[in-house]
Image: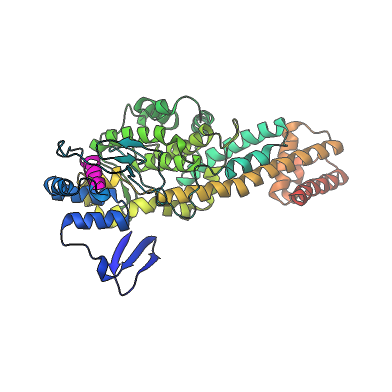
Amino acid sequence: MSSQLGSRMAVHEENGLTIRTFTSQYIPKADPIAHLEFALKYEGVNLPVLSATFRALGAAPIEAALRQTPSGKYTRLIGFYYEFCTGETLDPTIEVGGNYVPALEESEYVTLAGKNSTRWRVRNNLLGSADFCPMVRQKQGIPSANDTSLQHAVSAMVADLPLSLLERAADYLYLQETKSTYRIEREEMPKLARMTRFLGLLHSGGSGSLDELLSEEGLVERQHLIVDPRYAETGFRVSQNYVGETQHYREKVHYICPPPAQVSHLMTGLRHMAIESISLHPVIQAALVSFAFVFIHPFEDGNGRLHRFLIHDLLHRRHLVPKGLLLPVSATMSKNLHDYDRALESFSWPLVKGLARFEVDENGALSFLNGTELADYYRFPDMTAVAIYLAATIKQTIQQDFAKELQLIQCFDLAREQIRDIVDMPDRRLDLLLRYLYQNRGVLANRKRGDFAELTDTELADIQSVFQEAFQEMQDRS
């Protein structure tokens, strides 16, 4: 949110930023407290800006304002946010009055139910603690906590499907998701042992407590499942890392991770926020936890895969997806990598393009010159963009990719059954034939004909016909 002066009142959006135009009568007095009150009243809550302002001002002007208007809504909010952001206590002899007011307006922000701060007569409905507190603004695309449309859509898709088909669908979807998560990282398909380990991690989604999962020990254990044992870590990282790529023998930096000294506090705050946010919509909770994790980047390796695993864990934990099934979210992401990158850049771009000062030496090691100064950027992130992105991605996954994969399995089942009526083939031979037919739009390619020399031309023609009919029949039903 940004404000400007103009001849008439107006509000418009520009590059994702809400700009409000005020007439001259709204100009606040020329003192910091008046400007803080104006910001809270008209521009909303920007915790990094508030924190920086409080450090510059100190306690004295705020205590003076509280003594002058101890019951004022905005002076009390300033006192509340001062202590929240700085960790310092204002003069305890100051007594405030007035009705309780919310820290965040529910019409403007995604909030928790909140707990009353008797000290300030403010209902603290923030999403996190001073260690880590994300913000999500109420925008189009943010589902409300009581919106169950996605759960109902998934349930409707699987309600009438036989258990045997769902079991095969689960096996297929878990394998595809494993491949897709590596594809997102632009890696070659890993060897079977690595894929099997990640597959096992996906299958564990939703089990155990969230507190254990997000503990240092729990995350280290899961990181060990997906990285080369030589690079497995015993705890959160102790060195500065970044996300980048080598171009023309130089490092191009895409994202600078928080300094290692901040990681433990951030992860403690993330863990607290994840547990407290159980009342939020499952997709919003999944977005906050998973993207916060990848922004903190607590390990040297495996952060991206663990980030996408956490999405699945929360969706299972919150029962958006039935037990044993999986939404191919990474498959949807991999088909729209530009959108995924843009969501990540909503947080990383301001750092790399202006806020962060850094140097990369000839060995590729990065020195973060003002990492301490930017601590508030990492602990108070605006995660509106990633929440909107994940909500849209999961909706697309359910309505398109998940539905398509289920339909595909049904098509193969129908084709398999009808082909067996023509030739009772061994399972492996039949599966190979089905794959060849699918790859070539229902026709066995001439170069593959020799692989099935035992089939007569008449049998093959009939097989191709029923295969095409099976897929057409399923498409007609949909």
Query: In the image, residue 441 lies at what x, y percent?
Result: 73, 52
Q: Is residue 347 visible?
A: yes
Could you say which is closer to the camera, residue 434 or residue 88?
88
> Which residues fall within the magenta stretch?
76-86
Q: Is residue 142 left or right of residue 79?
A: right
Q: Is residue 302 left or right of residue 257?
A: right
User: Residue at the bottom extreme?
Assistant: 7
Could you say which is closer to the camera, residue 36 or residue 470?
36
Could you say which is closer to the camera, residue 27 or residue 462?
27
Q: Is residue 33 magenta?
A: no
Query: In the image, residue 81 lies at what x, y percent?
Result: 25, 44
Could you say which is closer to the camera, residue 39 or residue 302?
39
Classify 441 as above or below 13: above
Residue at 73% over, 33% down:
162
Q: What type of secondary structure mainly makes up the magenta span?
A: helix
Q: Is residue 246 visible?
A: no
Q: Quadrant of the N terminus?
A: bottom left
User: Residue at the right extreme?
Assistant: 458
